[in-house]
Image: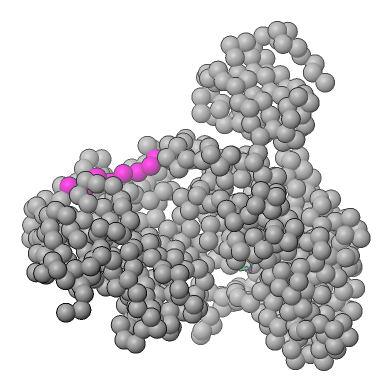
Amino acid sequence: PPMIREGLAERAITLTLDASVRHREGYRLEVTATGIRLAASREAGIFYGLETLRQLLAMAPDSVPALTIDDAPRFSWRGAHLDVARHFFPVAFVKRYIDFLARYKLNTFHWHLTDDQGWRIEIRRYPRLTEVGAWRKETIVGKNFDPYIGDSTPHGGFYTQDEIREVVAYAAERHITVVPEIEMPGHAKAAIAAYPELACTPGPFEVWTRWGVADDILCPHDATFAFLENVLTEVMELFPGPWIHVGGDEVPKTRWKASAVAQEIIRREGLADESELQSWFIRRIERFLSSQGRRLIGWDEILEGGIAPGAAVMSWRGTAGGIAAAREGHDVVMSPGSHLYFDHAQGPEQLEPLSIGGNTPLDRVYGFEPVPAELSPAEATHILGAQANLWTEYLATPDQVEFMLFPRLLALAEVVWSPASAREWESFIRRLPAQLALLDRLGVNYRVPHVEGLELDRLTLSDTAVIELQSLLPAGTIHYTFDGSAPTPAAPVADAPLRLPVRDSTVVVTAAVFLPDGRSSPVRSARFSRTTLRSAERIAPGRVRPGLAVTYHPATFPNARAVTGRRPAFRAVADSVARTGRERAETYGLRFSGLLRVPADGLYEFSLVSDDGSVLSIGGAVVVDNDGWHSETERFGMAALAAGLHRLEVTFVQGSGGASLRASVRRPGGAWEPLAGAWLAHLTAR
Ligand code: TNX
């Protein structure tokens, strides 16, 4: 009840539970000359209002500006996940992680507690789960899969039930629900190592020391269900929230195919195959959980072979699984690898610390839209929200986890809280430095944003290249070298534009941002060279037609350069550099060839965005090299071109996973435009 009424307490902070603030997590914050008033219909809203106030005070400790904020979240599932199975993290860090979530008004902590490499939760009835399953004899070093190299260092740990209760209570005080994940039937080698009778083959089994997808999974016999029900019963005692995550991802069917027990169940239950057996498995667990008043959530593989009624889906292999589930009336949490996997690198993989790979920079996270345009408004109500996943194969320490989490968590916070219309990248970037300064005070090991100005190898037509290196952070100092080595704080400081003498040779600039506390950004580097205009081709105008010629080559190519021009499955004319929509094979190459129409003499910039690789050449010389199998990555290049027509070629390779291709061009002093329409031409056959 409101204890202090307006006017009674001058310059006080009053917190009021007020049913007129409608949203269950919303709040209204008013700062006036007479005081600060915060109202919400429930405690959660008060909590979020205080987090906002805390941020305002941190930005302007002496004078919070007068303002009124009427605020409420867009989504009810605002989540972040932490994998404590691949590497174990102590309770103190788990609490710190929860604090991070709370600061940015997330309300769901998905705790990935079991996997092939470790079982991390004490289960009283099955002590071997933690005596045996919580420990592995060593861990693979880097990516040394073949030949395998281990570190000969035992790794492990687990949370006692008391510790779990402590964490759950800690989260609850911060209005965060903890969703435990117990993986089944795959990603369960640690459990099988402890209790080999859970497998379809006799074993013995070891807690896994490498990463990937293991063939040894739980056998679908009665012993496994008795085990799982007992485990889940203890789990439900510890986690009072509505949701239990049962994994369900990446389940190889090798063992079930060879198992008489599994095959007998398929016959007995009239199932079509092993994938229906998996769906039967999850359905059985779903019945058990719903009989206990809980809701099952699983990775999108639980859709295969038919989804259990009442189950919710966490869409990680893109958004397609989420779309399918929402259309069938199931609740969905969006967590696509393409945008919300915080174990992926925060820039081109080879320029970032060792990670599982990928390229998910801050702007990609910020641009994620949880509600797919394909869904009708009714279907869209099934999108509960979104969450980021932080898998820890390559993250062994809290510092490394914080590096991958920040600043991407700040982008996620806006994706799941703010209305889509309020999201604006430029505004986010403007506000970011102050947020990072706050993180400095908390001692957070966020990724210091890299130096800007080295995105591409630059060409100039004069003897001197003038370049301006920039840091997003006012407190950051840019140090650089000319010898290709990574700069140290002893290297020269780039506090003014650099004038590079490029008349006689190329200059390589390598730079990083350093903060006062000694931390630094990933290193970036680019080459600066003098060039001359490439002269245009001599072509009779009558032979030129609009668009590029494109050929399609269904085959597996190691990279875009290898895409051959011979024997295409089809030929077409393309009016832009993009996939044609007619590609049917899983792996293929595309080759665009023709002419670039250059309107005036000058230096032109080109960009290629692709998943997987792409290469753009002009007159036979590579201008943008975005080659290799990789997730969606943007690369840039430059060319000095005389007005007229130039030979243009773009090749693209589709290897695995998602597929995308976009090309853009920027004329001197201009803005980016799609490489399409009037820019493109090709020759008719003579
Ligand atoms: C796939 S995401 C997995 C995890 C890995 C992750 C690495 C999911 C449901 N399964 O087991 O850690 O990729 O990015």
Q: Position of residue 79 (x, y in %)?
A: 66, 50
Q: Position of residue 82 (x, y in %)?
A: 65, 57
Does residue 571 lie above or below 437 as drawn? below
* Displayed quadrant of residue 111: bottom right
Q: Position of residue 352 (x, y in %)?
A: 42, 61
- Residue extending farthest to the front is 542
Does residue 564 lie above or below 418 as drawn? below
Q: Determine whether, in the image, residue 527 is placed left or right of residue 241.
A: left
- The image's colouring method is one colour
Does the magenta run of residues contain 469? yes
Does the magenta run of residues contain 58? no
Q: Is residue 122 visible?
A: no
Q: Which quadrant would the N terminus be assigned to in this image?
A: top right
Residue displayed at 79% across by 79% down? 277
Does residue 176 lie above or below 252 as drawn? above
Q: Which quadrant would the C terminus be assigned to in this image?
A: bottom left
Q: Nearer the viewer, residue 558 or 510?
A: 558
Tell me how many marks there are.
0
Which segment is the magenta one? Answer: 466-473
Does residue 332 lie above or below 549 as drawn? above
Residue displayed at 67% across by 9% down? 10
Residue displayed at 66% across by 48% down? 377
Residue displayed at 51% across by 28% down? 59
* Displayed quadrant of residue 171: top right
Q: Position of residue 435 (x, y in %)?
A: 50, 38
Ligand 1 quadrant assignment: bottom right
Instruction: Name the main secondary structure of what is drawn in magenta.
Output: loop
Q: Determine whether, in the image, residue 624 is placed left or right of residue 589.
A: left
Q: Is residue 595 visible?
A: yes
